[in-house]
Amino acid sequence: MIRQLAVAFVGLGAVNTLLVWGVRAPHVALATLVAWSVALLETVVLGYGYRWLTQRIAILTKKVEGIRHEETPAHVLLSPHDPFQQLALQINYLQTQQRKARRDMASQNQEFATLLDYLPIGVMVIDRYRKVELANPAMEQFLQRQISPRRHPFTQDVQQFELASLINAALNDRQTQHKTLKLPGVVKERTVDARAIYTATSQDYFQVLVLLYDVTEVYAVEQMQMDFVSNASHELKTPVTAISGFAKTLLAGAKDDPEKSVEFLKIIDQQSERLVELINDVLTISHIESGNAVEVAEVPVGQVIASQVALLTPLAAVNAVTLVNQVPTTLMAVTDQHKFDQILKNVLSNAIKYNRPQGTVTLTSKVTPKSWTLTVADTGIGIAPQDQLRVFERFYRADVSHSNQLVSGSGLGLAIVRELVQSLNGKIDLQSTPDVGTQVTMTFPVA
């Protein structure tokens, strides 16, 4: 700065001297001295002005640099008469707006991160270099591996061939891809709806957003619906076909044979009862699903169980099965008696029908401060492990049931039991071993 002031002083002095000579002052020496004195004064004033200007520019420059580096410098306060005051005010306003925008962005980023963390859909962002930019915890669960937060090739995480091919197709063809595929799971494989969405902000910059949505339960429900239609059609077709066939046989002339006529009419009557039973069971499930009210009251459960055992004893005797009731008749519980009767009838009927000759059905109970439990255990043919998860489905029958023509029923008994138990806020558990027997445990709240 001193050098610059020296140059300015010499320049101003020279200019003033030229002016003195140009006006032909009578006292040249004195005029020259005055000219250089004025030049010195002008240099001092210029230096002060330059210093003041430099300070203002330095302050404002530092302020702008602080804003650019996302720092939080204090506001610049200048006098209202300062020519830089308006510029300082605008810079202060810019800083305030930047702080607000930064806070809003941080809040949005936090909300976005929280949404991604708790989103049940697997999300992964892959850039044009085939590297992972972002992945959420759900994606880690789908792929069963921890995904590094650093950019890395997506093939390090995606080991499943079909999914990797889907992503590569989106990157190569620059088009969104969609496919339903299977992914291995911890317990069982999962059905996943996979989408590789191609997004481009320019010709050179694009990303692929991978979304994985678990549709295992959806497909399971669809399969159950198909099984329901198939099984319902089968169960309805059997009695209807029998009734129609024997009715036509009678009309064709068998009615003239008294012995055959009575035999065929008995078969028609049996199949009609089976059809009525099936329709009643379907109506029962429909009523349960319609949400009909639960009428709870204090019920002598022990006496109700004893009555049902007495009613079903003839059926047990026909099947050479012994009923053993170990539930005390003094047992009381708050429940819906009508629904409990239906539960008990269906469970006991199954235990009798699927038992073996000289087998037993044992009823026991247990009471705790918070719940009470009824257990029905039989020594019957049992249920295979692969069928135990599905016996509560409508019209589903285990393979043994399908092959044993001596056992009749609608295939809705346990489905009705489960719906009724759940309507009473209870839980039902089934444990079974083939050729050993089955144990059904129902737990209900005390109040």
Image (tube, rainbow, N blue to C red):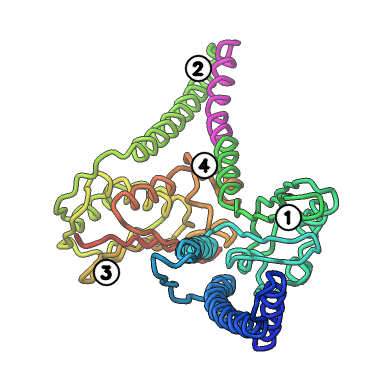
Q: Give the residue at x 31% y 49%.
A: 423
Could you say where residue 192 lies in the image, as x and y percent from the top left? 65, 54
Q: Are marks 1 and 3 in contact (CB under 8 Å)?
A: no
Q: Main secondary structure of the magenta part?
A: helix
As drawn, which residue projects farthest toward the front?
26
Q: Quadrant of residue 64?
A: bottom right
C-alpha distance separating marks 4 and 1: 45 Å
Please name the residue that numbered disc 4 is placed on.
395
Label whose residue precedes the other's in the sequence (4 or 3): 3
Please name the residue that numbered disc 3 is placed on.
366
C-alpha distance separating marks 1 and 3: 58 Å
Which label is found at residue 99? none
Q: Residues within 10 Å of mark 4 (few under 14, many from 20)?
A: many
Which label is found at residue 258? 2
Label whose residue precedes the other's in the sequence (2 or 3): 2
Please name the residue that numbered disc 1 is placed on.
208
Q: Give the residue at x 41% y 29%.
A: 276
In reply to whether residue 243 is colored magenta, the answer given is: yes
Q: Secondary structure under badge 2?
A: helix
Label whose residue precedes the other's in the sequence (2 or 4): 2
Label whose residue precedes the other's in the sequence (2 or 1): 1
Q: Is label 1 or label 3 in front?
A: 1
C-alpha distance separating marks 2 and 1: 80 Å
Label whose residue precedes the other's in the sequence (1 or 3): 1
Q: Are marks 4 and 3 in contact (CB under 8 Å)?
A: no
Could you say where residue 49 lies in the image, as x and y percent from the top left? 54, 76
Q: Give the residue at x 39% y 39%.
A: 285
